[in-house]
Amino acid sequence: VLIFDNNQKIYSDEETNSIKKYLNNGGKVIFFVDGVWVEDNFTTQSTKNNLEKVFRDYGISLNNNLILSANAETVNFGNGLVSFFVPYPFWLKTNNFDSKVGYFSNINQLTFPWASSINISKKENIEVSPLVYSTDRSWEQKSSSASGFTLDPQAIPQPQIKELNKKLLAVNVKVKNKGGFFLIPSSRF
């Protein structure tokens, strides 16, 4: 099952319980879910999906932050009259993935537009494998309110050296003798 966040769908308790039941009966899911929703006009909103209920049961939390990186995709900004190309730190690139996993055998790098980070806590009978990290030249932007993020490429505050470190961007969760899921914290991945 593939689940893509579009910030329109709010999962009911019945739906989140169905997802958990599916996983506990051997099902497999790939989640493309945002920690912060970014609109096309560079405004942000809190996510609405309610899937944190599912993740929490498996020892995973999706943070309400946005990850930036000095390793960034070059993006075309502008309008019909003027365009400029600039590395955009919110569209981070990384080649920091688990080399033992066959999924990455033919991949040189991955791009995560407007990604959030993931935290892991141990749970009995659940194996969580970190799959992808940002580079160690990455940092996070947090906000007390969803509208408090600075997304404008010309106004992004530069990080302090002590703020730079790698962030967890994708995990594989396996439930002992049952199913599992991948969590990719970027619906635009």
Image (cartoon, helix red, strand yellow):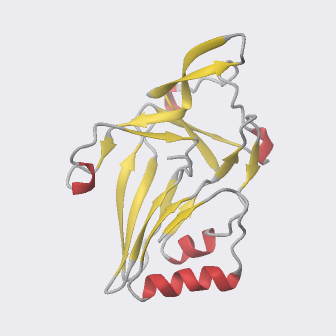
Q: Residue at x 52, y 82 (%)?
A: 20
Residue 29 appears anywhere in the view: yes
Question: Residue 68 falls in which quadrant of the image?
Answer: top right
Look at 72% across and 42% down and name the residue there: 39
Identify which residue, 109 or 126, lies in the foreground.
Answer: 109
- The answer to whether residue 166 is above or below residue 183 is above
Residue furthest top in the image: 82
In the visual, does 157 lie left or right of 160?
Answer: right
Toward which corner of the image does residue 172 lie, by quadrant? Answer: bottom left
Q: Looking at the image, which is closer to me, 130 or 84? A: 84
Lateral position of residue 180 relative to residue 98, left or right: right
Left or right side of 123 for 50: right
Question: Residue 165: x percent and y percent?
Answer: 44, 37
Q: Position of residue 161 (x, y in %)?
A: 50, 26
Tell me which residue sits at (73%, 44%) in the image: 143
Q: Is residue 120 left or right of residue 131?
A: right
Note whether 189 is above or below 26 in the view shown. Answer: above
In this rendered view, identify the residue nearer to me: 34 or 62: 34
Q: Residue furthest front?
A: 80
Q: Quadrant of residue 141?
A: top right
The number of numbered discs placed on residues in the rendered structure image is 0
- Point out residue 115 in the picture as x, y percentages from the top left corner: 55, 45
- Give the residue at x 73% y 60%: 8
Residue 93 position, x and y percent, is: 43, 34
Can residue 101 be spotted in the picture? no
